[in-house]
Image (spheres, grey):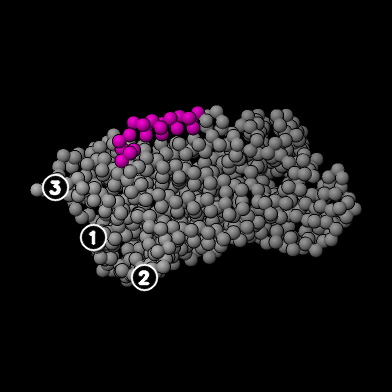
């Protein structure tokens, strides 16, 4: 591996113009493809094999007129007043005239008026799904009632959902990353080159992703996750190789040779670090939820591109930059200096020796501290997000709050029971029994009379719970309803709605999690066994990850669900975590955790293989890579942290959890607990049973074969004395 990458690095260094031209051409072609072929992203949420999805599919078949997106216009009279039908009628009429609206229902005819007569709900039915409603239609919908005086009018419903837009808040993360790079390298050239390389990789990955939207259905959150991860790992991988290049330059190697060796050694670590991230992301496909599979595959694609860019385009950039990647004062001086440009031994060596002395206290304090942070995770609740957790002041949130004020929170989370019978008689009888049983269920406010399709074989029951869609009481009511109607004979009854969907997706994810963990962790441990040729090092890496993910869940629950310090991250209304956050977080964090494990421990392995004793190898690994890993973690944290500033609650929670997870894993687990364990294990850390050692292929990650080959070539070229 190291020899192959060494040759690739030198080739890219020598053919810098061609390599840069190839990537530029690819970027242009994919950019044109994205501009011409890009289709709309989708917010469709499907879960094959669940009861709620079965009910939705039945609705699409039996009630096609209700298959499009719905909107709810909330109308309120001034305090102390009542609504006049004549004043509401123009609002209904205006809504019905919107292009694509099949019906706008007068609340005085449907009975959607509050008991005090002050509030009313106008139900608006579109002919297309929410992701197919145009921006012009949405604008027209939001403008309904704008000219009506004396009434408060808010616009809600699923039609208000839109694509998540990337704005200036994410650029803050890139700006912080640039500052960290300048401080780390002490060179604007090195920092700018590293950042440019990563940005090109992200641009290529995103352009390719959007080019595919004409043939695949891409969820609106998938590009955000791909951008988030592509930026973070792209900068980190380039940072790691550039740092090793600077080290070889400082040791006196010529630029081309330094680039080749940096690509061969650090590049090997990048390949396997990237592979663990890709495995974790692609593994999301085993869950069986289409939108989650798309998110994982999209992000995995951008990570793979980031690896390719780091191995090919970066050496070309290094060729253009030459020794300018070093601080100005080092470019024309000899001597052996560290890659940070300060002294032969920086803080990393000091920290490594300190860890050796304090390894037992560090392990005790670290494990107990992370264990304490995990405690809030015991109360974790999961659900699908609703408008009640949207940013205060947003149209969807205003409509949600006004509906709750006038009718109760249950009207924001209506449930639907779909009754399917063999004939009209059995369907009608089953619908009557179901209505009676559902009305008698605790937590249910009302059940509307059954609506039958033309054949009378399918009935729709609209159910209003007492509490909001994410309330525990509503979840209990869903379970009770399903238990009560299960024994009704003569028809199949399926329950759906926001709460039911959330319950089903949470259960499906919980069932898939053990399989996912077994697949991803198992493959990654095998991969790390190949990298480190050790049994204990991969196991230690996996156990450290459990500490990371537990503490991350605990902190996220404490802030986003329980509301502690929620205002600091812009959380207006605490609530359950989005259902797919745990498995998504586990997958991404596992990949990133293995990144830092590979970066740190690969250097320890490298020095150990080249003859250093285990303690010295640990200190050397920390000394040479602690600064790089610190910078990489700060960059990842800043990139993920930039997404915390977004209003979308899903993206905000993902960005926050990833940022916190990176901080915990890099600075507590990898920089403190890992070297402490390595110091305790000593030579045993590198133990591998001989049969396993013979069975595993030797990929030469640490570059031992490469060093022997280069040494032999040097001897062959040396002049022979006579």
* Disc on the earlier residue, 2 or 1: 1
Residue 364, numbered circle: 2
Q: Which residues are magenta?
A: 10-32
Q: Does the magenta-highlighted stretch encompass residue 28?
A: yes
* Disc on the earlier residue, 3 or 2: 2
- Residue depicted at 43% across the width and 50% down the height: 274
Residue 536 is at least partly visible in this image: no
Q: Is residue 117 above or below residue 673?
A: above
The quadrant where residue 444 appears: bottom right
Q: Which residue is mark 1?
A: 350
Which mark is nearer the camera, 3 or 1? 3
Q: Picture coordinates of residue 388 (x, y %)?
A: 60, 49
Mark 2 and mark 3 in contact (Cβ < 8 Å)? no
- Residue depicted at 53% across the width and 62% down the height: 518
- Of all residues, the one furthest to the left in this rendering is 722
Q: Which residue is mark 3?
A: 720
* Disc on the earlier residue, 3 or 1: 1
Which mark is nearer the camera, 3 or 2? 3
- The reply, left or right, for residue 102 in relation to residue 231 is right
Classify 10 Å Cα crowding around label 1: few (below 14), some (14-19), many (20 and above): few
Q: How many marks?
A: 3
Mark 1 and mark 3 in contact (Cβ < 8 Å)? no
- The reply, left or right, for residue 662 in relation to residue 258 is right
Marks 3 and 2, how far apart in space?
A: 59 Å
């Amino acid at each position: 591996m190291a020899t192959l990458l060494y040759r690739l690095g030198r080739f890219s260094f020598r053919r810098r113009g061609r390599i840069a031209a190839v990537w530029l051409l690819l970027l242009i072609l994919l950019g044109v493809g994205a501009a011409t072929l890009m289709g709309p992203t989708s917010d469709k949420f499907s879960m094959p094999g669940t009861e709620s999805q079965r009910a939705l599919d039945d609705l699409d078949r039996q009630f096609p007129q209700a298959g499009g997106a719905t909107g709810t216009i909330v109308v309120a009279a001034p305090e102390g007043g009542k609504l006049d039908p004549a004043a509401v009628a123009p609002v209904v009429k205006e809504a019905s005239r919107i292009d694509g609206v099949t019906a706008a229902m007068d609340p005085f005819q449907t009975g959607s008026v509050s008991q005090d007569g002050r509030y009313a709900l106008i139900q608006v039915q579109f002919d297309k799904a929410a992701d197919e409603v145009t921006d012009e239609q949405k604008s027209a919908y939001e403008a309904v009632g704008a000219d009506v005086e004396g009434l408060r009018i808010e616009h809600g419903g699923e039609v208000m959902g839109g694509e998540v837009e990337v704005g200036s808040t994410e650029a803050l993360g890139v700006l912080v990353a640039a500052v960290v790079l300048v401080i780390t390298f002490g060179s604007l050239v090195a920092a700018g080159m590293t950042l440019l390389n990563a940005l090109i990789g992200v641009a290529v990955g995103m352009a390719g992703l959007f080019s595919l939207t004409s043939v695949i259905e891409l969820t609106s959150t998938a590009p955000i996750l791909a951008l988030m991860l592509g930026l973070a790992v792209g900068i980190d991988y380039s940072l790691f190789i550039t740092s090793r290049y600077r080290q070889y330059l400082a040791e006196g190697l010529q630029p081309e040779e330094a680039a080749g060796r940096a690509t061969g050694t650090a590049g090997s670590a990048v390949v396997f670090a990237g592979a663990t991230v890709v495995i974790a992301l692609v593994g999301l496909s085993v869950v069986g939820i289409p939108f989650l599979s798309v998110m994982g595959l999209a992000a995995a694609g951008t990570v793979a591109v980031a690896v390719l860019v780091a191995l090919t385009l970066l050496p070309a950039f290094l060729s253009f930059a030459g020794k300018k990647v070093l601080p100005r004062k080092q470019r024309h001086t000899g001597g052996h200096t560290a890659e940070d440009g300060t002294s032969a031994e920086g803080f990393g060596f000091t920290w490594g020796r300190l860890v050796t002395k304090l390894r037992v206290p560090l392990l005790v304090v670290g494990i107990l501290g992370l264990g304490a942070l995990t405690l809030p995770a015991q109360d974790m609740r999961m659900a699908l997000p609703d408008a009640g957790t949207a940013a205060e002041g947003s149209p969807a949130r205003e409509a949600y709050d006004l509906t709750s004020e006038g009718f109760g929170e249950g009207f924001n989370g209506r449930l639907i029971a779909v009754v399917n019978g063999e004939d009209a008689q059995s369907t009608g009888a089953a619908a009557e029994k179901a209505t009676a049983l559902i009305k008698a269920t605790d937590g249910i406010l009302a059940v509307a009379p059954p609506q039958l399709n033309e054949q009378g074989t399918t009935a729709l029951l609209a159910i209003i719970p007492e509490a909001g869609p994410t309330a525990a009481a509503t979840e209990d009511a869903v379970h009770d309803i399903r238990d009560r109607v299960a024994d009704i004979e003569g028809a199949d009854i399926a329950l759906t709605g926001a709460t039911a969907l959330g319950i089903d997706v949470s259960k499906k994810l919980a069932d898939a999690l053990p399989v996912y963990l077994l697949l991803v962790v198992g493959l990654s441990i095998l991969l790390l066994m190949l990298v480190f040729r050790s049994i204990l090092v991969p196991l230690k890496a996996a156990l450290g990850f459990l500490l990371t993910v537990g503490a991350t869940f605990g902190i996220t629950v404490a802030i986003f669900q329980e509301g502690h310090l929620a205002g600091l991250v812009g959380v207006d209304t605490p609530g359950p975590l989005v259902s797919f956050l745990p498995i998504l977080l586990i997958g991404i964090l596992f990949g990133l955790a293995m990144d830092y494990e590979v970066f740190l421990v690969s250097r320890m392995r490298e020095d150990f293989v080249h003859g250093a004793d285990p303690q010295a190898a640990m200190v050397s690994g920390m000394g040479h890579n602690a600064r790089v890993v610190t910078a990489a973690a700060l960059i990842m944290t800043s990139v993920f942290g930039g997404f915390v500033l977004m209003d979308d609650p899903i993206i905000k929670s993902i960005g926050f959890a990833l940022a916190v997870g990176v901080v915990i894993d890099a600075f507590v687990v990898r920089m403190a607990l890992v070297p402490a364990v390595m110091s305790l294990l000593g030579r045993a850390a590198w133990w591998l049973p001989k049969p396993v050692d013979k069975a595993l292929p030797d990929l030469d990650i640490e570059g031992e074969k490469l060093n022997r080959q280069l040494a032999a070539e040097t001897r062959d070229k040396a002049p022979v004395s006579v």
